[in-house]
Image (spheres, rainbow, N blue to C red):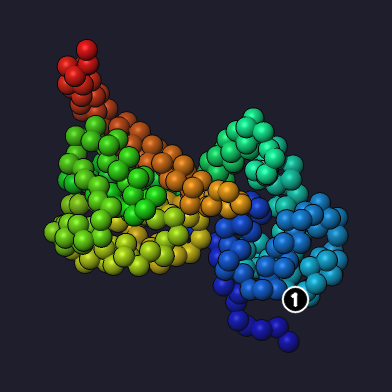
Amino acid sequence: MLSSRRTPQIVPRGNVPGCFVRIRSGFRSLSKGEQMVAKAILQDPQAVILGSVTSLARRSRTSAAAVSRFCRKLGFGSFPRFKIRLSQDLASPTADIHEDAAVGDSIGEITRKVLHGNIQTLSDTLQVLDEKAVEQAVDLLSAASRITFLGMGGSGMVAQDAAHKFMRTGTPVVAYTDRHLQLIHAALLGGADVVVAVSHTGHNRDLLEVLQVAKAAGARIIVITHYGPSPIVKLADVALHTMARETAYRRESLSSRIAAMAIVDVLYVGVGVRHHRDVVKNIKKIRHAILRTRM
């Protein structure tokens, strides 16, 4: 008898990414058996396409039921649908160009692998970035009377870089990376203010507390975070997702910083296009002021 309970999916709304992106982004949310299925798929995806649900269950040392649960949780519905999408991913020339740096690699090899890793991060992020969400974020930022960027650790650097860019829009902009300053500022926000919070994991308790204060004050919240469900997404008016993979020498957060900064660039250009004349005028003023400091 079939159970009426539905398997919760770990795929948020928005663009529908490919198999490899979904597996890597949702790996930690899978059960032990489902993780074994995921590893078997990543080790030999071609064999999965040519095989059956039973053969995959045997290779992953699980069961056909575990394979089916894995497919439903990742949002594919069934194993046949999963195989179709997997075959499409493998046919793509950018399906998986990432390689991990290894001891003994030359500087040239390390350079190639690191840069390819960055390219892969941006390519994966493009898959999960929801165009409608980006447009909503640009709408909020374009109408804001004040913009606040928040981040801690590596994400704090992204917040500071974002504030540096958005100064050119003419809208009052600040960036805070200290929790106490963030809380003080959040308590004084209002309905015309927009907060952009950057967090790779989306689970930073201090930042979540700050956003709760900002939301209670009436501010609108945009978050830039790693693809997948997280507490920070639940607090957001708009969520923009990055996608990065972890390797031995490059934790996910390193690559995600590049993706987060790219999203900031998209938002800045989007707002700049909306307020083209003002932004161009401000850039000319800034250049004129900076030229005075040069010999």
Quadrant (top left, top right, bottom left, bottom right) of the N terminus: bottom right
**Residue 61 visible in the displayed image:** yes
Q: Position of residue 73 (x, y in %)?
A: 62, 68
Residue drawn at x 48%, y 64% is 229
- Above or below residue 240? Residue 266 is above
Q: Position of residue 258 (x, y in %)?
A: 46, 42
Farthest residue toward the front? 104
Say whether residue 64 is left or right of residue 29.
Answer: right
Amino acid type at mark 1:
Ala
Q: Please state the total of marks drawn on the protein image.
A: 1
- Above or below residue 230? Residue 200 is above
Residue drawn at x 80%, y 72% is 61
Q: Position of residue 210 (x, y in %)?
A: 26, 63
Which of the 4 image quadrants contains residue 78? bottom right
**Residue at the disc numbered 1:** 65
Which of the 4 image quadrants contains residue 191? bottom left
Farthest residue toward the top? 295
Residue drawn at x 13%, y 59% is 188
